[in-house]
Amino acid sequence: MTLDDLRVFVAVCRAGSLSAVARDLGCTQSAVSQHVKRLEREMGVALLERHTRGVVPTQAGRVLRAAAAHGIAGLDLAVRSIQESVRGDVGSVRVTTGATTLRHFMSEAVVAFHRRYPRASLEFQTESSSRRCFDALAADDLDLAWVTIGDRVRGIEQRPVVDLPWVLAVRADDPLAARPRIEVADLAEIRHIRLPARSTSRAHLDAAFAELGVPHRSDTSVADWDTAILLAELGLGHAVVPALPGRFTDGGDALRFVPIPALPPLSVGWAVRSWDALTPLARAFADTVRRTCERTGAEGQGP
């Protein structure tokens, strides 16, 4: 068994095709097949099932794929960390995030990071949920994932950066807009624009609503927080959303963000495979985002 055997096997599992991996690697399909067959001989069990549309891992194959992907990613990260320690400020930082993360949590940090490390590059991979960010972090050559902090995930370390209080996004001409705060009874009377299905933020909010006895009266579900806020501004419902840094104090003429103290805050932050193995540049970017979020959050809360 060689490292190349494992790399090729993981690539085949992801692509679901021997020929696709052969094209990517610039070799023959037979050469790719030999890598897999060598692993199967050593394991003494079939690792792939052949179907008309490609291949899928067997149960044993799934076990090996998970372990190999995690190990290869960790090894690649360690190599990059060592190389970047030697090169200094030359290298890249690979981040996986949700669709609106870059705008709300990282825009200022990206500018500050590029000023400090002009020869470094930032690469972003967008995912639709924290769960998918965890999967991408475990499977791919990524450094950091920005997620909603939740339950423990095997092989992943999570570090909260900022706690976001919940607010009600409501049109300025709505009676609730004049309230200093939204009470639980108010939440039971409104029609909600619901957060993205299967998102960690929605799971947190649904759990809090269940504990408080708040019913879900909703006609609308959205793909991200920004869409929920936009629909609230259009008067199509009320959106309970996290107080995004720098935005919830400035709703413009048509929108207000009213605090909901009864709801426990939503914690967001970084997830990595190992903080100790982070490259110097990745650690610097993570720290830059943390500092800007903490500062923006403190400014948004006022004196």
Image (spheres, rainbow, N blue to C red):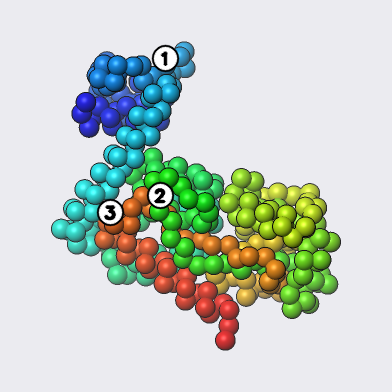
Question: How far is mark 3 from mark 2, CA to CA?
Answer: 12 Å
Drawn side of residue 218 relative to residue 224, left or right: right
In terms of secondary structure, where does tag 2 sit? loop
Q: Earlier in the sequence, mark 3 or mark 2?
A: 2
Q: Is 2 above or below relative to 138?
A: above
Dot 1 alpha-carbon crowd within 10 angstroms: few under 14, some 14 to 19, many 20 or more: few
Q: Are marks 3 and 2 in contact (CB under 8 Å)?
A: no
Rendered location of residue 5, percent (x, y) = 25, 27
Drawn side of residue 217 relative to residue 119, left or right: right
The foreground one among 34 and 87 is 34
Q: Earlier in the sequence, mark 1 or mark 2?
A: 1
Q: Are marks 1 and 3 in contact (CB under 8 Å)?
A: no
Q: Earlier in the sequence, mark 1 or mark 3?
A: 1
Drawn side of residue 115 relative to residue 134, left or right: left
Kindly identify which numbered label has been placed on residue 156: 2
Q: Nearer the viewer, mark 1 or mark 2?
A: 2
Q: Amino acid at mark 2?
A: Ile
**Residue identifier under label 3:** 277
Q: Amino acid at mark 3?
A: Ala
The foreground one among 94 and 252 is 94
In which quadrant will I find the N terminus? top left
Kindly identify which numbered label has been placed on residue 24: none
Question: How far is mark 1 from mark 3, CA to CA?
Answer: 37 Å
**Residue identifier under label 1:** 50
Q: Amino acid at mark 1?
A: Arg
Q: Is residue 28 visible?
A: no
